[in-house]
Image (cartoon, helix red, strand yellow):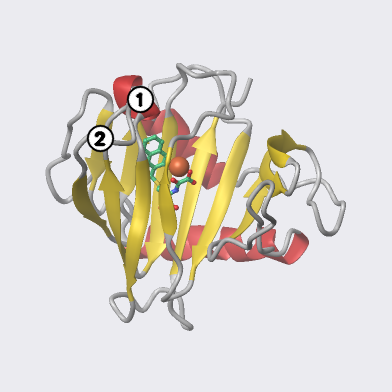
Amino acid sequence: MAAKKPYRSPQGFALLPGYLDRAQQQALLACVREGLRAAPLYRPVMPRTGKPLSVRMSNFGPLGWITSVSGYRYGRRHPVTGAPWPPLPDMLKRLWADVSGWPQAPEACLINYYDGKARLGLHVDADEDAATAPIVSVSLGDAALFRLGGPRRTDPTRSLRLGSGDVVVLAGAARHCYHGIDRIYGGTSRLLPRGGRINLTMRVVG
Ligand code: MD3
Ligand code: FE
């Protein structure tokens, strides 16, 4: 059970603070580590410019979200190793079933790793054809300053802190809002021995 009250707004947005307790976070981290042995984090690049992102990425799933100079897409293989993505851990499948309210299982789980200096600029997630399915996010490790806006880039934004074990459900209108990560609060969690933050986002793609 979540220790604190869920935070819900705009429509379809739910922050479930402390949804995973420490033991569950450790169990999930062990699954993530195992997956990353098969599908190591790589440094994605911006389409067109080839400029590297500061966030490193990998995926679980049948499908993974991939960036390259030619654009963003979902694909079945790791862009560096060429291997299929590792399966989605059962723990994440259960979490999706418990919080998403969506009958279909997720097809992709993007793994983002932020070191203390990484950021993720304001963007919308628009590469999924299944635009009405929710996205479920789980945070592990150091806290982050998350920013959520509206459907237009110029809409006002609100900042929220995401801590280790927090779950966010993005359904309805919130699913199409601009969002990003402005900073990582180094040293706020001891879950990852070398610090930093892992964020997992489960998605239905098509
Ligand atoms: C709001 N990840 O992977 S998770 C992403 O912390 C992404 O790594 C961030 O943005 C992270 O695309 C934020 C929470 C989240 C995920 C998807 C959203 C918030 C969202 C989609 C629409 C609106
Ligand atoms: Fe996003």
Q: Residue 79: image x %, image y %?
A: 80, 52
Ligand 1 located in image quadrant = top left
- The amino acid sitting under disc 1 is Ala
- Figure check: 120 above or below 189: above
Q: Nearer the viewer, residue 27 or 49?
A: 49
x, y percent for residue 57: 61, 57
Find residue 171 and name its label: 1
Mark 2 and mark 1 in contact? Answer it, CB < 8 Å. Answer: yes
Q: Nearer the viewer, residue 121 or 189?
A: 121
Label 1 SS: loop
User: Which image quarter: residue 62?
Assistant: top right
Q: Is residue 79 above or below residue 126?
A: below
Q: In this figure, which residue is indicated by the disc labeled 2?
A: 14
- Residue at left offset 69%, top offset 56%: 50
The crowd level at tag 2 (other Cα within 10 Å; few <14, some 14-19, many 20+) is some
Compared across the picture, whether 82 is left or right of 204 comes to right
